[in-house]
Structure formats: structure tokens, C-alpha cells
Amino acid sequence: FLVIQRFMREVLCATILLLLCESHYCAVNTGTMKRKIQATTDKDETTTDTPKMYESTEHCAAKAEPPPQQRIKIILMGDSITQGSFSATLSGWGAYLADVYQRRADVYNRGFSGYNTDWFANYLEMGQGRRDLFFKAPLDDDIMERASESSSTNIQLEVQKGENNVKLVTIFFGANDASDAILNPRHHVPLSRFQANLHTIASLCRKNYGPDVHILFITPPPVHHESRLKFQIEKFGKEKATGKLERSLELSGMYASAVESVANQLGVPCLNLWKKMQESKPSLNTSSDDGIEEGELPWGSYLSDGLHLSREGNLFVGRCVQEMIHDNFPDIAVSPCPSSGGYNSGSRGGKGVGGAGGVGPWHDQINSGNPLIFKHERD
């Protein structure tokens, strides 16, 4: 009887313990399920109530299109006329382009004061030049040759084209190359070699930026004799000034024609500044030629010293380059907002620069309710 009684007590204890465990298990599961249901409900409410960052907004010209993933690059190659193109005091033509392409492109000034095409072409072949102009580490010829036959991922990545996103290159040389062979032999480059150098520069651009990169040649501007001689006196004094022109209108015209010839051979556009400047007049002379000294030409005001660009000359070149881009490269052309005239959210660009949009949302596309949600909505 005692044995049976002990057995019954153990069975009862085991039963009570089992019931307690099951009760605890049910309570835990019920709490977990409630939390899951609550989380799902909160998520649905958040999704429903959260405002979108981009709203469908009417701009001056049209609704915004999705912005490109990154800004394109525009490279300005040339001599001192290009190096000085970012001048704030002279309203540089490079700065003019940077204004047009704000939030759409990075404009790189790669002008080298005093350079002719001999020196520039050699610089492009140097390791420093490759890094500076082509954004690449220098590769020896044997490495390049092995890369074409190698399956090495690292080598192949280094020689891939088009990854730098360069869409436009301006090649603006000739002002130094056209120096008189006797009066300035240091800068003078014979016409035939000058043209060969231009071919080399263009070829290297296509090789490193990709075969579809846009190339725009720009000829040297005309040389204004009176201003050049005046500058010579100001720089060296009357006693040391030779009164001889180491650069002339005739020589610059020959080299301008040579640039145009190379552009035609390569099938790319050319901005002939030598002709356009002489056919035009700075705005200060549009109404009358009064006040112009005898022998002075109206277009001389485009030049600060008879060779380099003045403020009027820089603005003239900036407008001309912009027109050339519109006429020849509409995919990367940008037009100002028709109401404000600025390059804000109402400006429009070609497909290559994001259409009506730019890099990042314009301020009037952002819903201030939740500016941290980056989701672009397109109609």
C-alpha cells in the first residue's frame, strides 16, 4: 500500500509540472505573436503615411527626369588661353562653361601656359600626363601589349575605356606654335608637325576617353598688331622693345586653317575663332566705332594684349563654344530656364547630362516631410 501511495504522489507531481510548462509555453508564444502582429501593423501604417522625397513638380520647361548616376567630365586642353579660362576677373570662358553645366558636369582646366603642341603631345605620353589628363596610372608599352592578351582582371580593368565618363574635349592650340620661326624659334612648330601633333592629341583622347568622346577643335584667335606692339613697350620699355612682331595676324591665320583642316580630316567640328572674331565686334563697339584710334580694329577689344583674351573675348569664346555644343553635340547640350535665364531646376539638358534633371534632386522636388527617403518618381 505504501509503495502504491508513493507512486501516485510522483505521478501527480509530474502531471502538475507538465501542466505548468505547457502554460508557460503558450504564454510566450502568444506574446511573440502579438509583437509580430503589432510590428506588421506599424510597418503598414508607416508605409502608408510616409511622404515620398520627390514630388511630381512642374518646372519652367518640363517635369524632372531621373538624374544621371554621376556628373560627366569636360576636359579643356590648350595653352595659356585655356589656362586663364577660369579667371574670375576676366569672366573666363572655361568658367562660363562651368556655369552652364552646374550640377551636370565637372569642367577640368588642363591649359598649360606657354606650351606648344610639341610639348603638350610629349606630356600626354608621360606618366604624369596620363594621370593628369587621362586619370590613369602610367602603363608601359609591354604591359599594354600583355593586357590585350592577358586574362588578368587587374590589367584589363586598367585599359578599359569610357569608365572616366569624359564626354567632351576641347583642343585649343596654335597661338604659340604660330610664332615666327626666326623671332621666336623656341615656341615655333612647323605647320606639318603642328598638324601631326593635333592628330596625335585627338588619337590619344579617343584611346583613353573612348571612341565616342566628343572632340571640339578651336583655332588660335587673330593677332591684333597694334595691341601687341603696345604690350611690348609696356613689358620691356621703349628702349628694349624691338617693334617686331614675333606673332602676326598672317601666321595665326595659317595655323587656324591648319586646325580646321585636321578637324575636317577627323570628321569633328571646329570653332574658327580667327574668322569669327574678325567678323564680329565686341558689344562696346556695336553702336559706333567712335573713339577707336586710327589703324585699330574693333575686334581688337576681344584681346587684352593683342594675343590673350580680354573679358569681352572670354565671353565671346564662351558663347561660341556653347553654340558649337548645341549644334554638334545635342546629347550634352544645356539650355537655360526660359523664365529666369539661369541654369537652375528649369534648365534643360540632353540625355547625356540627365535631361531636365541634374545630379541629385532639385530643391523643389523634395518633400520636406521626409527628406531622407531617396526615391525618385517618374511620370
Image: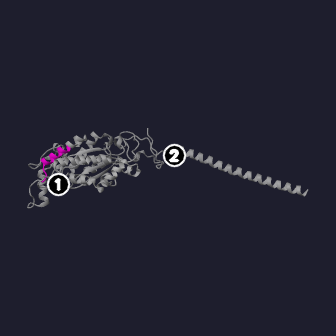
Alpha carbon separation for disc pair 1 and 2: 66 Å
The scheme the figure's colours follow is: one colour
How far from the left and from the top, in percent, is residue 60? 36, 41
Q: What amino acid type is highlighted by mark number 1?
A: His
Q: How many tags in the picture?
A: 2
Residues shaded magenta: 246-260
- On the image, numbered disc 2 is attached to which residue? 50
Q: Which residue is at a point 38% across and 51% down the rendered structure image?
A: 155
- Residue 123 inside the magenta-drawn segment: no
Q: Is residue 58 above or below residue 12?
A: above
The one of 278 and 293 positioned closer to us in this rendering: 278
Look at the numbered disc 1 and give the secondary structure of its residue: loop
Q: Is residue 119 left or right of residue 332?
A: left
How far from the left and from the top, in percent, is residue 74? 31, 48
Nearer to us: label 1 or label 2: 1
Q: Is residue 367 left or right of residue 197?
A: right
How many neighbours does mark 1 have within 10 angstroms: few (below 14), some (14-19), or many (20 or more)? many
Number of the label disc, if any, that sits on residue 187? 1
Q: Are marks 1 and 2 in contact (CB under 8 Å)?
A: no
Q: What amino acid type is highlighted by mark number 2?
A: Thr
Magenta part, dominant SS: helix
How far from the left and from the top, in percent, is residue 171? 24, 48
The one of 265 and 334 positioned closer to us in this rendering: 265
- For the C terminus, which image quadrant? top left
- Residue 252 inside the magenta-drawn segment: yes
Q: Would residue 33 be visible to someone looking at this image?
A: yes
How far from the left and from the top, in percent, is residue 13? 81, 55
